Image: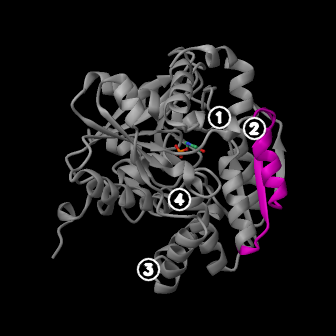
Amino acid sequence: MNTKSSLPLHRQVPDERGFFGKFGGSFIPPELQEQMDEIARAYQRICRSHDFIRELRSIRKHFQGRPTPVYYCNNLSNKIDGARIYLKREDLNHSGAHKLNHCMGEALLAKYLGKKKLIAETGAGQHGVALATAGAYFGIPVEIHMGEVDIAKEHPNVVRMRILGATVVPVSFGARTLKEAVDSAFQAYLKDPVNSIYCIGSVVGPHPFPLMVREFQRVVGIEAREQFIEMTGELPDNVVACVGGGSNAMGIFSGFLDDPVELHGVEPLGRGSKPGDHAASLSHGSEGVMHGFNSIMLKDDKGEPSAVYSVASGLDYPSVGPEHAYLNSIGRTTVGTATDEEAIHAFFQLSRLEGIIPALESAHAVAYALKLAKQRPSQDILVNLSGRGDKDIDFVMEKYGHYADMEY
Ligand SMILES: *Cc1c(COP(=O)(O)O)cnc(C)c1O
């Protein structure tokens, strides 16, 4: 018989109530709790059914183009003369980022539950595009809530969502970014929780979302581990991923949790460590409840979620998925940071040396990997390249165009 501690780490948490140690759980109004319980029960039943597994596998292969490759950055590794750097190419996943992995899973679950509408928030627009893609595939209408600041900044993704048939709802209160978009989307969902389903964009929110999204993203880690061993004959020494809510990081980390591999989550340090200038929740936050779950979050003087900032819209969230808070608290993961400036340098470096334009979010992971590579010259570093940078090119050239004249 399996005792709890002999199970793989990803099977030990969360418990039935969605707790990863003291983090996670569900802190929501009773009427919403009923809906979450129903989703949790349905998920536990459906995710084990062979029909569901078969359909999801087929979608991943034929629609998403999985498996995505692991790629060795020969030029970049030679140039820095440090560690060997590898990328897990989630930028090549259909729609350009890892987010389609959990969106296809969530939409497939919605289909099994007979839901008539998918509701979600989006920051950089990547989750919105991924969900709009999933909605089009399954023929289920999609409603995306997005802060006005992000709508202006991420115009191409707004256009994509509308082409894919989604309704984009602009959010005009507060800081008009991701946090407000989450509040607005939750309100819309609460108006008709029977016919609609909330599709969270990361490993955050009340139980069962942190569990479900991790399980849908786990394919990244499972593939990467197998591919890396096939390529090199061994495990990587380090796995690096950027952390906004933490879904791409949990996806790749979960493949290596029980291995002697150091797992590094990279948070955005923005303009610096002053409150409001960054979104490095684990590095600078404290315990608290937000958006229905207990985790480590950035708070202002009144204990409210504080204003956050990052050059990467997909990373500016004042909390982090509960599993990250847990893994960090037991010392299983290492938390690092990259500033805007470091991320922009990495954005150009990867573009120039490898012909790969990374998303600004992913550029944070690359920037951190470059720092780590100098400290650990004899090691292997596998970076989760969570998305491609096409959505960011206009913004980068407008604001950081002078970097394009530098030598890399
Ligand atoms: C949304 C996004 C992220 C951040 O989300 P996580 O849940 O932390 O993975 C990172 N990279 C890209 C490309 C994104 O679109």
The numbered mark, 4 or 3, whose residue comes first in the sequence reads 3
* Residue 403 appears left or right of 367: right
The reply to whether discs 2 and 1 touch (Cβ–Cβ < 8 Å) is yes
Closer to the eye: label 2 or 1: 2
Which residue, given by chain and number where applicable, does mark 2 sit on? Answer: 154
Q: Which residues are magenta?
A: 138-166
Graded by Cα atoms within 10 Å as few (under 14), some (14 to 19) or many (20 or more), the crowding at tag 3 reads few
Which residue, given by chain and number where applicable, does mark 3 sit on? Answer: 48
Real-space Cα distance between discs 2 and 4?
26 Å
Residue 307 position in % (x across, y down): 64, 26
Which residue, given by chain and number where applicable, does mark 1 sit on? Answer: 313
Real-space Cα distance between discs 4 and 1?
21 Å
Q: Residue at x 61, y 58 (%)?
A: 94
Real-space Cα distance between discs 4 and 3?
17 Å
Mark 1, ligand 1, within 8 Å: the answer is: no
Residue 52 position in % (x across, y down): 52, 80
Circle 2: residue type = Glu
Question: At numbered mark 1, what does the secondary structure look like: helix, strand or loop?
Answer: helix
Real-space Cα distance between discs 2 and 1?
9 Å
Closer to the eye: label 4 or 3: 3
The numbered mark, 4 or 1, whose residue comes first in the sequence reads 4
Graded by Cα atoms within 10 Å as few (under 14), some (14 to 19) or many (20 or more), the crowding at tag 4 reads many
Give residue 209's mark. 4
Q: Is residue 136 above or below residue 291?
A: below
The numbered mark, 3 or 2, whose residue comes first in the sequence reads 3
The residue closer to the viewer here, 389 or 212, is 389
Asked whether 163 falls inside the magenta stretch, the response is: yes
